[in-house]
Image (tube, rainbow, N blue to C red):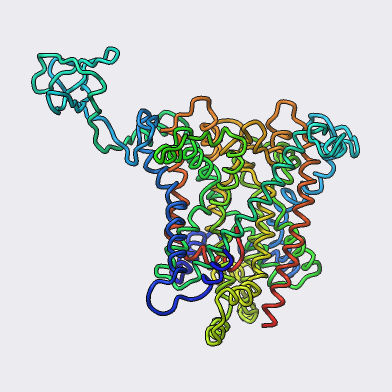
Amino acid sequence: MKRLTQMAGAVVTAPLGWLAALIDPPLRLWQRVAGQKGMVGFFLLPNMAIFGVFVLFPLVVNIAYSMTTGGALFLADREFVGGAQYARLLTCQNYLDIRTCQEDQFWTAVRNTGTFVVLQVTLLVICATATALILNRELRARGFWRAVFFFPVLLSPVVVGLIWRWILDRNGVLNAGLVGVGLDPVNWLLDRNFAFAAAIGVTIWAHLGFFALILLAGLQAIPRDLYEAAEMDGTRPARVFWRITLPLLMPNLLVVVVLALIRAVQVFDEAYVLTGGGPGTATLFLTQYIYEVGFASLLKNPGLAAAASILMGGVLVVLTLVQLALGRRNERRGKLK
Amino acid sequence: MTRALGFLTRRRGGAGWHWTDVVTFLWLGAGVAIMFGPALWLVLSSFKSPAQLAEFPPTLLPYEARTAVVEGYDRPLPLFVVTDEAGSRTLAEVRRVGTVAQMVDPENPGEIERVNIANRAPDRQVGFSWGNYLDPFLRFDFLNYTLNSVFVTVVATLITLLTNSMAAFALSKYEFRGRNLVVVLIIATLMIPLSVILVPLYSIISAAGLVNSLWGVILPTVATPTGVFLLRQYMLTIPDELLEAARMDHASEWQIYWRIVLPLTAPALAVLAIFSVVWRWNDFLWPLIVLSRQEVYTLQVGLNAYAGELNVQWHYLLAMTVITMIPVVLVFVFLQRFIASGIAGTGLK
């Protein structure tokens, strides 16, 4: 860690030293003219300009887009229609039957995403908790085991998708295993249910290590003496888990659940490379719907895509607020301790 | 399950094997197989020839058929191990007609033997098809894709580090009106993903003439709120007395930032740099939208396009997937510990 620190320091200062020295004289002049306040502006400006143009401004303009129609790209050329795009997305003759909805693709995506979120987050959090609990035991080569579960987190979604496409292929290694034990091979990615399950499994595979690591940090923050006291009293392990581990881990667990929800709502990359949304629309998720409607389809409809993305953004904002509130509560608790 | 979890939270004490130890090692063993296995399988498969990839059931290691140069034939002939009434021997195949193969003994090429193909098996040895790795660079655009990806990753990371650290410096070391507003604004957008603002963002990039430009991929990603947040938290721990002392010595504010605060923030910068590299290298959805011409594809977009073609050439695709993995695996191998503490401490990524 120390060496890395030094390395990073050297990289930042040494090769660009002359450049930094070149910038200094004009800035010194500016500082004399504008004072410290002017320097605040100088330091904030680059980041805030990029942030403003590429994050904040689009965020606001998105609302305007969602109230327009037509295929034109620029807002000025688009026709204002008020809430018509939202109406189109949300109108169904019978809300229990997706086929009666005006925009049935959207509802398919909503249903798929909803099912995905519930199943994926539940399984992911259970697996991550179990993994964290196991990694928190006194193991030899703990770093190695931690690395095993963390490794897929850094892989790109495209690589993750392709690896699993290759494994789940009709002639893939998983089917070879099935045939090896005397079962029939399965068309994993061409069967609706299996493809959906594959999307869940693959995204869990890719993100498990990240959440396990956060939970592991939470577990390690639990004071050891609590366990020692419980052991002295001869408390049964199940009771130790329910009375000590779980309550003290709960703040971290909640944050992890919300973070996992935020990620799951936006599922796209891995699933798209793995299944392309298919077979049919079995794994069509919301982000892919937005992408298809806004960019990929022949009849591009940016207004509709914007409206859908604002609906999705609304869900994410609510989840983010919950997450921030939970994080703040944890921070306060940490300070009390 | 809950009972198992209960036991698992306990530290292993005393001698002998408790059943929780068994569960632990089963879980860890399965972890190795499921987590490492697929990547390993990918790497091994990437060295197989197209014919071998089509084989079912697949073999673990890549094999190549042995061949022999036989007198009287222009090209090397594939060797087969033939087993029949006459015993087992190695023959070279001249041609095959239906279920009968015409074969010769490499030692005695004069006389042609007819062998039922059921009686012969290819004579193979472990061999790696390096062409899978070379051809995509020589014959397709993968060199371009790689260079594009490297450019995007390096430039975006440098800009991210510079602009984020400058903003974090202003937000942590100066008192000014509206500071809290800016901080709240940044935190509020921490979790607003690009996928929510795709449409207007694309129109802005388009208005700026950056469609099909790598700068169109880079710019929207560099003002990461996460980075500003992380660096600011770190800079808050640097004592202000240090800055005051420098001001006494007539250091300019820029020098204070560049020569004092930035080097002291190196650990946080390193964490952000690692993550920025991984994020930008792995980016997919946004480049997919901005880049529609082949010569500007990044590796991720190129791979996806290649995988979407009607007859996927898996032997090339797998090799290129491995290439795409390499930088990230290197980062992982060398900086694993650092990444772990970065994530656990800040919830980054």
Q: Residue at x 54, y 37 (%)?
A: A188
Is the residue A146 above or below the residue A86 in the image? below
Is the residue B241 above or below the residue B314 in the image? below
Camera-side residue of A261 and B130: A261
Is the residue A45 above or below the residue B198 in the image? below
Spot occupied by residue B138 in the image (x, y as percentages of width and height): 40, 31
Q: Residue at x 48, y 62 (%)?
A: A11
Camera-side residue of B254 and A89: A89
Quadrant containing the N terminus of chain B is bottom right
Q: Residue at x 68, y 57 (%)?
A: A47
Camera-side residue of B175 and A195: A195
Spot occupied by residue A306 in the image (x, y as percentages of width and height): 78, 40
Camera-side residue of B220 and A16: B220
Spot occupied by residue B8 in the image (x, y as percentages of width and height): 51, 70
Q: Residue furthest right?
A: A82
Quadrant containing the C terminus of chain B is bottom right
Residue A293 sits in quarter? top right
Residue B241 can be seen in this image: yes
Residue A295 sits in quarter? top right
Q: Residue furthest front?
A: A182
Q: Is residue B320 left or right of residue A35?
A: left
